[in-house]
Amino acid sequence: MTDTATLVRMVNQIAANMAHLPHDQAVAQIVTHLRSFWAPVMRADLVAYLDDGGLDLTPLAASAAEQVRAEVGH
């Protein structure tokens, strides 16, 4: 199991790598990456972190996490 701090660091890093794209396209690319490479439990932990305030998420990472939240039905 991956700890929350590691998940936050990872999603923020993914977001940083997509920051050159327009916002909506960057969010879509981040979400695609999370769907493709993160286990469902990792995505659920990210959503739980977002639900707890998501304070350390960058704005772009938070936008992607919100979309993941919508997909998992939270």
Image: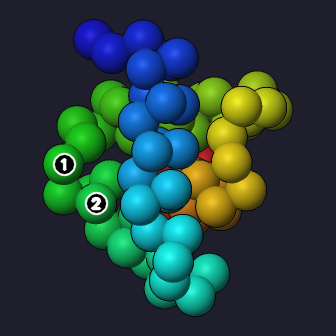
Classed neighbour count for the residue bearing mark 1: other residues with Cα under 10 Å, few (<14), some (14–19), many (≥20): few
Question: Label 1 amino acid?
Answer: Phe
Residue 57 visible, this orientation: yes
Q: Residue furthest left?
A: 36
When the figure is inspected, residue 33 is found, relative to residue 21, above or below; the finding is: above
Does residue 70 appear left or right of residue 45 in this picture? right
Give the x, y percent position of residue 62.
Answer: 66, 52
When the figure is inspected, residue 6 is found, relative to residue 32, above or below; the finding is: above
Quarter placement of the N terminus: top left
Does residue 25 appear left or right of residue 47 in this picture? left
Residue located at (37% from left, 73% from top) = 29
Give the x, y percent position of residue 39.
Answer: 22, 37
Q: How is the image coloured?
A: rainbow
In this figure, which residue is indicated by the disc labeled 1? 37
Tally of numbered tags: 2
Question: Label 2 amino acid?
Answer: His
Secondary structure of residue under mark 1: helix
Q: Quadrant of residue 54?
A: top right
- What distance separates the C-alpha of mark 1 from that of mark 2? 6 Å
Residue located at (18% from left, 48% from top) = 37
Q: Quadrant of residue 18?
A: bottom left
In this figure, which residue is indicated by the disc labeled 2? 33
Residue 70 visible, this orientation: no
Residue located at (63% from left, 28% from top) = 49
Q: Are marks 1 and 2 in contact (CB under 8 Å)?
A: yes
Disc sitting over residue 52 in the figure: none
Residue located at (33% from left, 29% from top) = 41
Give the x, y percent position of residue 9.
Answer: 49, 30
When the figure is inspected, residue 18 is found, relative to residue 41, above or below; the finding is: below
Residue nearest the viewer, comparing 11 with 21: 21
Does residue 68 appear left or right of residue 56 in this picture? left
